[in-house]
Amino acid sequence: MRHNPDYLLDDHTRIRALIRENPWATLVSDGLTASHLPVLLEDGPGLSVVSHLGRPDDELHQLGEREALLIVAGPNGYISPGWYGAGPAVPTWNYLAVHLYGRPEVLSPEETYQVLVDTVDRFEHVLPAPYQMDESYARRIAPGVAGFRLRAERVEGKAKLSQDKSPQIAHNIIRALDTDPTYANPALAREMREVWTPEENR
């Protein structure tokens, strides 16, 4: 990502929250091979995620052989200049994104099975009647996927949230993102408040 000090996102607590709340990621490897997949953030120091790919995508990515890039996109959305209350102006797109670089570590069959279990549990536990995966069935299909862990050796984060605008315009944008009938985006509004609203007033 192109570096812009105004949009730098380097707070690891915010980065971890962004990954946890937006677990659909894109894995990009050498040769511009890309796959889309769910990721689970691991506890502990540093930034580490686990995920799984359907075979033979693991061979396409040559997992374990070279560095890969994992892209996690956070809340994002169109920003209309009609919300600014000042002109002339042009539209833009506000967004948050994190790039994790590292060499994926291929997991053992048992570790891969556990990633599948943890992935189901992660997304089922919020439901009124969480689905319980049948272990014998899950173990039978598990060889069809490849689990991996990516420990981030380098992290780049960007939060473009109208930092180039005045506080008045920023708050007008936040209000529109909360209420606009077409482009309402509460998640993006919340992220903008993190930048533009003093902590004691949030």
Image (cartoon, grey):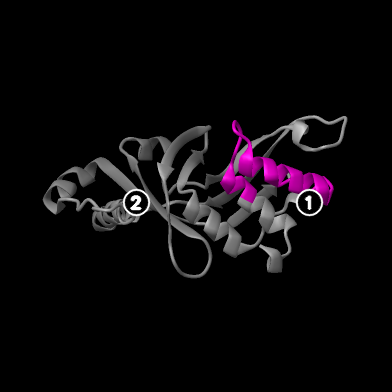
Separation (CA) of disc 1 from disc 2: 34 Å
What amino acid type should be assigned to the residue bearing mark 1? Asp
Reading the chain from its start, which is encountered first: label 1 or label 2? 1
Task: Tell me the tag on residue 6.
Answer: 1
Residue 62 visible, this orientation: no
Give the SS element for disc 2: helix
| Residue nearest the viewer, comparing 196 with 143 | 196
Front label number (1 vs 2): 2
Q: Residues within 10 Å of mark 1 (few under 14, many from 20)?
A: few
Left or right: residue 69 compared with residue 112: right
Q: Magenta includes 162?
A: yes
Look at 72% across and 59% down and name the residue there: 197
Q: Is residue 148 above or below residue 53?
A: below
- Rendered-image quadrant of the N terminus: top right
Look at 88% across and 30% down and name the residue there: 88
Q: Position of residue 110 (x, y in %)?
A: 24, 57
Left or right: residue 64 compared with residue 95: left
Q: Residues within 10 Å of mark 2 (few under 14, many from 20)?
A: few
| Residue nearest the viewer, comparing 11 with 105 | 11
Q: Which residue in the protein does label 2 denote?
A: 123
Q: Position of residue 146 (x, y in %)?
A: 31, 45
Magenta span: 161-189
What amino acid type should be assigned to the residue bearing mark 2? Phe
- Rendered-image quadrant of the C terminus: bottom right
